Image (cartoon, rainbow, N blue to C red):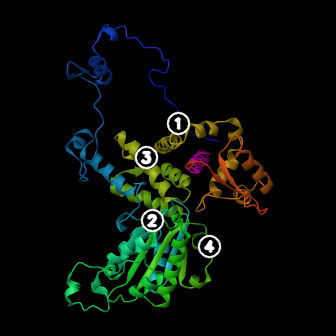
Amino acid sequence: MTMIFGKRGRNAGDGDEAVVDADRPAEQPAESKPLWRRVGAALADPARENGKRLAGAPALPRFSITATDDPGEAARSMLGGSSARARLALADVLGASQPIISREQFSGRRDTLSALIGAIEQQRSHVVLYGERGIGKTSLVHVFAETAREAGYLVLYGSCGVEADFDEMFRAFAAEIPLLYHSGISPTAHEAGHDRGFASLLGTDPIDPRELASLLQKIVGTRVIVILDEYDRAASPAFRRDIAELIKNLSDRAARVQLILTGVGSNLDELIGFTPSIRRNIVGLPVGPMRASELEEILARAEEAADLQFAPTAREFIVRMSGGSPYLARLLGNRAAGRALDDRRRSVSEADVIAGTEAVLAEWNAGLPRRVQALLQRSDVQAEWSALIAAARASGTPDGWFSPHDLSMEAMAVDPASARAILDRFTGEIDLFDREDDGQGREPRYRFRTQGVAQLLGLSAALARAER
């Protein structure tokens, strides 16, 4: 069993004894130096003497790429032009912190993209994309948006927040729809030549879904797609109610506007609830884990773009640890390839992948509160490591809550009663979980108290499996 945690470094002044170099000339006692000189000495570059850099002292790190995405002169001299370009290519193809927005950099998901296009183009339906976190839903809708714009669709994108407001969001969307597409306005009319949108036809009162649908029914000459990304984050019941009402009214009026909602969920009910009146107007498309061949395609694109090669064992390691997640495949591939480029190599080894993964785990662990770091290293916690990893998998719901039954389904050797006992033990002194009771006798729900623990446990377990 492999568990990777970061190590705490000791800071100067924590009780360490001073190390004296016998070959170094004795310095003037600090008390006899002026205050500015003592402060300056603490901040000075140790590789400088009398304002000149000592020969052989390592240079400070520099950026490899300029802000214009061009390898700068310093990068060309330090890394070589090809290495700098490789790093730029890696950032584009294997960048894990941002979604893929270009068809040229997108890999896999052909079946899901085809189904999404079919639902919009042939069925004229609204669509809900649902799946786990980090599974690539945002990248998918960005690439779909590019594809739809090529076909003449007007695509409007918005990301939902916890306090998403229907009036504010759809006024902004309406402002982006030119009056040119209003059926009541001639293309040659004076107002069509002005930079005005549908929002100019809305009153000052909060928008009603029926009023908005009536206005959007007047769209001609194009079709409009509204993407509401991360819909699961919207906490307001009123916002969700208005979205459901808008979907129904747009469908009843056969308006040339379709909504695409994306969010975390294992099924359609988790994301939009059971609303029979709108179910017939919605196509639900699950976005599941990527196949191994699709993850390998991601790495193959990186090889071609950056002119490097993943060794077969390195590629297999990344695919196995990713568990179908394109986010993890890009993150681990990027770290491993970066280590190879640091060593001026164009071949990425299995050792690069392991070292890169350990570095990611150390960073994630360091980002946790000290209290949680200490808890995860307790022997009684590590004794239940398998159950905790199963809990991490069970917590992949929109709100992170799961039941003892959910945990037992992930850990087949643990029955619901034992799962509840383990979770209860970790909600007392070892407070890794929050517990919520409904007061009606049903089994309680649990959730990791600190975000990031489930992700850390999942990748740690993946590394252990891959090493075995």
Q: Residue at left 30%, top 92%?
A: 184
Q: Earlier in the sequence, mark 2 or mark 3?
A: 2
The residue where tag 1 is placed is 6
Magenta stretch, main secondary structure, is helix
Q: Earlier in the sequence, mark 1 or mark 2?
A: 1
Count neighbours of disc 3 (C-alpha within 10 A) and say few if under 14, some if 14 to 19, many if 20 or more: many
- Alpha-carbon span between mark 2 and mark 3: 22 Å
Q: Earlier in the sequence, mark 3 or mark 1?
A: 1
The residue where tag 3 is placed is 335
Q: Is residue 455 magenta?
A: yes
Residue 111 placement (x, y as % from top left): 49, 74
Q: Residue at left 49%, top 54%?
A: 328
Q: Which residues are magenta?
A: 453-468
Label 3 sits on what residue type? Arg
> Residue 128, can we see it?
yes
Label 4 sits on what residue type? Asp
Residue nearest the viewer, comparing 456 with 86: 456
Tell me the mark number nearer the camera, choosing from 1 and 4. Answer: 4
Dot 1: element: loop
- Is the C-beta separation of discs 2 and 4 under 8 Å? no
The residue where tag 2 is placed is 138
- Alpha-carbon span between mark 4 and mark 3: 37 Å
Q: Which mark is residue 269?
A: 4
